[in-house]
Amino acid sequence: MRRRNARPYAYEKGTIMNKKCWFSFILGLVALLMLSACSNYRASDKNDGFVSNASHVFIDSTSSDVLCFNLAVFSKSEIEKVEYLGLEGTNNNDADYVVSIFDNNIDILNDYEYKGWHIKYCMVEVKCLGNVDNCNFENLVLSIDGNKQTVHSDTAVKHKYSEGNVFSDKLQVAVFPVEFSTSTINTSAGTVYEFRASDDITLNGIRFDEYIVASNIMYSINYEEPQPAEFPIEVKKDQTIKLSLSFNSNQIESTDYVLTNIYFDYTVESTNTDAYCGGVVVFDPIYPINSDDVSAINTLIERIIGEK
């Protein structure tokens, strides 16, 4: 009797164990499929759904009223609306800032599509409130057509809300360009600045806050034959000094966006006072677009998605 009873018991026990094994197997399979789906979703979000050029934005600037820069966002579907949600960075309180997002697309960008990617070029404006004198952030949280997206910059955006654009009556501005294509960096292409001295001054040098250095500097006094600049340079009262220079960098590539300040340091001889003339300068990888040529945007996308 015991042997006959043992068999059903053994069979029943085995059945229960098999059911447990099958149940565990199914749970494991479901978990594996979920992990795979999540992994695929993350890859899709990064490579197929949405990207930005935030990791190629370099900002170290100064201006008293506002930080203003361009940001490119790309999507596999046309982007209708980009809205601000928040800033994330070092010692930042989101309530200390008023951030606005403006559509900076032109007609050619509205119709742009490359390998399935559409672009929205946004102007980001960050104003401070109260006693805040700077901002420093790595992440900008946006709503892209209702979908939350965090754009991350590997290099923190740094801005000081103090007097950055300084133009004095001692070194009066005649020509002061501020916007350039990033493609001009590390090439022979450059620009020209021009000033008129209302007092005897000594020009001591040209510098940037970060990322850029001036090179191949030439100068002329009262439009005479240009010569290589060796600082300090004396400029007498009522004389005009014209300076041509190129931009160099060991950090910046042609697809990067750069916002910084340029300064012309000088000494007023009558008072032996050091001063500077300076302002914000921008290096943009997309603008200006010449003759409907969007190859720079194509190159930017290729770099971002890694299809080189």
Image (cartoon, helix red, strand yellow):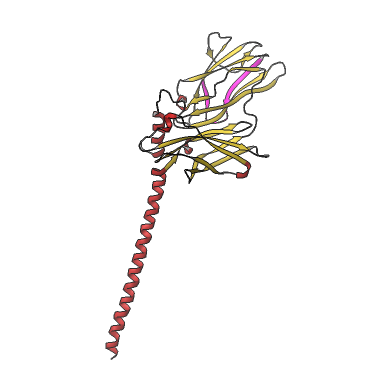
Magenta span: 201-216
Tell me which residue sits at (27%, 88%) in the image: 4
Q: Quick check: 16 left or right of 68?
A: left
| Predominant secondary structure, magenta span | strand
Image quadrant holding the C terminus, namely top left
Q: In the image, residue 190 lies at what x, y percent? A: 49, 20
Q: In the image, residue 218 lies at what x, y percent? A: 53, 15
Q: Nearer the viewer, residue 227 or 20?
A: 20
Is residue 21 among what the camera can see? yes
Using the rendered view, name the quadrant where residue 35 is placed.
bottom left
Image quadrant holding the N terminus, namely bottom left
Using the rendered view, name the quadrant where residue 16 is placed.
bottom left
Residue 39 sits above or below residue 59 on the image: below
- Does the magenta portion include 73? no
Tell me which residue sits at (33%, 70%) in the image: 21
Total of numbered circles in the picture? 0
Tell me which residue sits at (69%, 16%) in the image: 269
Residue 102 sits above or below residue 266 on the image: below
Q: In the image, residue 235 lies at what x, y percent? A: 63, 13
Residue found farthest to the top? 224
Q: In the image, residue 70 lies at what x, y percent? A: 51, 33
Q: Nearer the viewer, residue 49 or 105?
A: 105
Q: Quick check: 9 left or right of 260?
A: left
Using the rendered view, name the quadrant where residue 77 is placed.
top left
Residue found farthest to the bottom? 1
Q: Nearer the viewer, residue 83 or 234?
A: 83
